[in-house]
Amino acid sequence: MAAEEPEVEPQDREAIEAYEGALATFTEKLNLLHISGGCPAYATVASASVRPRLTTTGLNEMLSGKRLPLLESLLEFVRIVTTPSGLDKPAAEKFRADPALVDQWRGYWQDVKLLQCRAQPANKRVRATVREVHDNALREAEALRHDAHAEAERIRTNAEADAERLREQARKDADGILERARETAAVPLPNGPDPQRVGRGVFRAALPTSTGRAQPRGRSRHAPPWPEAGCETRPSAGRHP
């Protein structure tokens, strides 16, 4: 989901852009002054400051254009970077910058400060708009997350129900197949004797032989019949007795 761009009123945008442009120009001039004074390190400038005491963090914000410095901090910076080199510490601390230069920088600062005051209400409105857009995006994301969770739960529930139905149907099918197999096993073969008890309570019916007499137990039904009593068996032709 693409982030929604906050709507900014045209007059607010103009006020903000005017201040940002003026601050950028002011910062560029301040860096040129720093360079013309020999570009001393931030720590050196901070240790040479008297009133107010400057910090390296504040100097970094001043010279990077992150924010407009206080007027007193600006004028102390102007005094330090325009102090002649070679002065001892007490003399350097008592040095005062050229009044014309001080007035010039005071004027620069006042111009930017005026634009900053005009842009402050616009910035507040923009921040409020951005906060509203952010809150709306969070609410929408939470709603989407809730809907996705509900949909996933619905899919899982349906899948479990489908799986249970399939298992139940498989059990029914298996029971039906088993029942039909049992019924088939109980049906006697066509043209065959009924199953009878053999062994321990189970025996088979005697099968008739080709002579119509019962086949003796333990003799194959395909073997020739036993010879009649008193009949002589003759050897086969071509064989010796």
Image (spheres, rainbow, N blue to C red):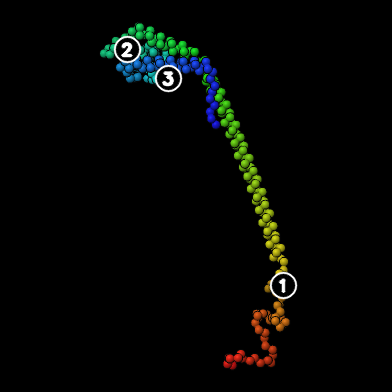
Label of residue 82 in the image: 2
Residue drawn 68% across the image and 73% down it:
199
Residue 240's place in the image compared with 46, above or below, is below
Relative to 63, 200 lies left or right: right
Disc 1 residue type (three-letter): Gly
Q: Position of residue 132 (x, y in %)?
A: 56, 23
Mark earlier in primary sequence (3, 2): 3
- Judged from this view, the residue extending furthest toward the top is 99
- Circle 3: element type: loop
Mark 2 burial class by Cα count in 10 Å: few <14, some 14-19, many 20+: some
For disc 1, the neighbor class at 10 Å (few under 14, some 14 to 19, many from 20) is few
Q: Secondary structure at mark 2?
A: loop
Q: Quadrant of the N terminus?
A: top right
Q: Nearer the viewer, residue 131 or 45?
A: 131
Residue at position x 52%, y 15% in the image: 11
Question: Helix or strand or loop: what does disc 1 sit on?
Answer: loop
Disc 2 + disc 1, Cβ < 8 Å: no
Camera-nearest residue between 107 and 62 = 107
Q: Earlier in the sequence, mark 2 or mark 1?
A: 2
Between residue 238 and residue 111, name the one nearer to us.
Answer: 238
The quarter of the picture where residue 154 lies is top right
**Residue 1 as seen in the image, left or right of residue 55:** right
Where residue 20 appears, as percent x and y from the top left, is 45, 17
Q: Which residue is mark 3?
A: 66
The Cα–Cα distance between marks 3 and 2, rounded to whole angstroms, is 23 Å
Q: Residue at x 70, y 74 (%)?
A: 204
